[in-house]
Amino acid sequence: MELAGRHVVITGGAGGIGRALARRVAAEGVRGLVVADREHGPAHAVAEEVGGLALQFDAGLESSVSSLISHASDVYGPVDVFISNAGVPGAMGGPEAPDESWDEAWRVNFMAHVWAARALLPEMVQRGEGYLVSTASAAGLLTQVSSAVYSVTKHAAVALAEWLSIEYADAGIRVSCICPQGVLTPMLELAMQEPAGAAALAAGGLIEPEEVAEATVQGIREERFLILPHAEVAHHMALKGSDPERWLKGMRRLVRNARAAAG
Ligand SMILES: NC(=O)c1ccc[n+]([C@@H]2O[C@H](COP(=O)([O-])OP(=O)(O)OC[C@H]3O[C@@H](n4cnc5c(N)ncnc54)[C@H](O)[C@@H]3O)[C@@H](O)[C@H]2O)c1
């Protein structure tokens, strides 16, 4: 899909990958651009810069996601492309992470995508056209060793995107899922505090949010499902699929070595 003349909503647009997406999408000559975030001040600054509209919302509440979509549609008409990008890192560690963190990440990293699809699909199907984009992560295809909360919720986001892509293709709906490894944003700073997580992220190479935005616009142009700003993620997926035991051994070794080096 070409973005020129389209109405695009970007969540989590106040900073990081979302802000880079807003800048890059604006350069395509869209008809309407909504920068949505829970942080209104920074979202407003981005919207002003790109000639868009800032809307405050909470990705963790269905009522807020559906109000965002109705408000955006009132201003610019039907949403053509919804980029569900807001996300939270979740607590470090595994099952011991507090329920509050599991719950918040489940809502923001996963249910927000369900709620957006629920609100948007009836109108998109009626028009025979629409584009759902979600920012998951390479953690949703492989894993993020520092956080089970993050890995599990991002796996769920990928699974939903796959399901929608299969089920709605014949209705004219396109779906893309953005799955980067380390991107230099405030979220990454937190993940880099844990030695094994930091080692895994550094091994994949850290890229700028602008590189994710560029890959996303190209991916949407080509209507590609999986957007992989780190190309080698495809290779890791192939290894995981063809030889999961070897992949797991490699991941265990990486974690062991990183923790031993950190003392
Ligand atoms: N940075 C990375 O290394 C990396 C890698 C892969 C995927 N991602 C994903 O990319 C997306 C963007 O992350 P980022 O790296 O730009 O991080 P970031 O922390 O810079 O940006 C996240 C944005 O989401 C907003 N947000 C968080 N919770 C919200 C809520 N409940 N309601 C509304 N807005 C909310 C924040 O205010 C912030 O503006 C996330 O989904 C993240 O999981 C990031």
Image (cartoon, grey):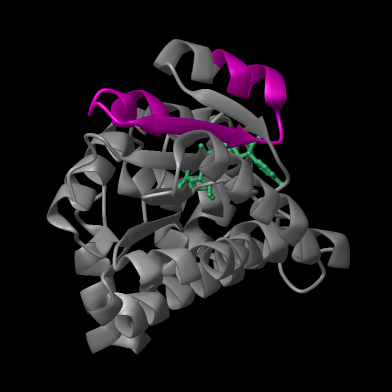
Q: Residue drawn 41% across and 43% down?
A: 182
Quarter-wise, where is residue 190 in the image?
top right
Whether residue 240 sits left or right of residue 9 in the image: it is: left
Q: Residue 225: within the magenta?
A: no
> Whole-percent x and y of residue 58?
73, 46
Whether residue 94 sits left or right of residue 237 in the image: it is: right
Task: State the extent of the magenta-drawn residues as a range.
Answer: 21-45
Quarter-wise, where is residue 184 in the image?
top left
> Whole-percent x and y of residue 133?
39, 56
Q: In this picture, is 207 found above or below 48?
A: below
Whereabouts is ligand 1, in terms of quadrant?
Answer: top right
Q: Residue drawn 24% across and 35% down?
A: 214
Q: In this picture, is 45 found above or below 36?
A: above
Q: Residue drawn 44% across and 35% down?
A: 17
Q: Residue 26: within the magenta?
A: yes
> Whole-percent x and y of residue 144?
52, 61
- In this rendering, does residue 212 appear at all? yes
